[in-house]
Amino acid sequence: MNSVDLTQHFLIAMPAMVDPHFAKTLTLVCEHNENGALGIIVNRPTDLDLQGLLEQVRITTSPGQAFGSLPVHFGGPVQVDRGFVLHKPSGNWQSTLKVGDEIGLTTSRDILEAVARGEGPPQMLVTLGYAGWAPGQLEHELGQNAWLTVKARADILFDLPVEERLPAAMQLLGIDFANLSDEAGHA
């Protein structure tokens, strides 16, 4: 398969995906180059909320700040003890990977401290863990019909309820997920 850069694209797991980490997931590819790929699953909330995460990492919230309704997501099976914050705008944090012009992926503590003070980015999605692919691995999986790809949109990430993100990404392709077969075919 020719070299392709899927940075800032969604990966839509095909129905035949049997890996329980990725079945029925929507993943944002944050980086894709000759060294492999890094992505964040954006539709798999956990039972942990942001308030609970801030307490676990010993960050005190300012009075009036409550985050009980903001879920922490399962971002992928790699480094599940490490936090990742997808956010818009990308801002100026200590450790941020820019994902296109609008979105950042930050791993430094300063963003969580700012959120706790009420000074964080207006749009964000917090995850534990990420998805990673070795060089050529994602391309191989694409060749095996494991994923559909489509250019990512920030409104799907930040403006839609979690259960609507995968169907909305499918709609970008003009496909209804219910109509996909779990049988792969090659022409």
Image (spheres, rainbow, N blue to C red):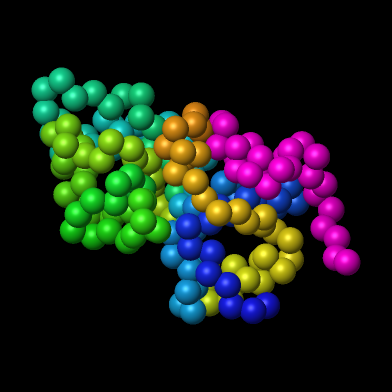
Closer-to-camera residue (126/1): 1
* Residue 52, image x, y percentages: 28, 32
Taking the view exactly as shown, the residue that stands out farthest to the right is: 187
- The image quadrant where one finds the N terminus is bottom right
Q: Is residue 167 magenta?
A: yes
Closer-to-camera residue (122/111): 122
* Residue 12, image x, y percentages: 63, 50
Residue occupying image coordinates x 45% and y 49%: 75
In the image, residue 91 above or below residue 38: above
Taking the view exactly as shown, the residue that stands out farthest to the top is: 64
Horizontal arrangement in the rendering, residue 107 relative to residue 140 (left or right): left
Query: Which segment did they paint magenta?
Result: 163-187
Residue occupying image coordinates x 52% and y 50%: 152
Residue occupying image coordinates x 33% and y 37%: 123
Q: Is residue 119 magenta?
A: no
Horizontal arrangement in the rendering, residue 105 relative to residue 177 (left or right): left
Q: Which quadrant of the structure image shows residue 169?
A: top right
- The count of marks equals 0
Horizontal arrangement in the rendering, residue 62 relative to residue 2 (left or right): left
* Residue 172, image x, y percentages: 63, 44
- The image quadrant where one finds the C terminus is bottom right
Residue occupying image coordinates x 41% and y 52%: 129
* Residue 92, image x, y percentages: 19, 54
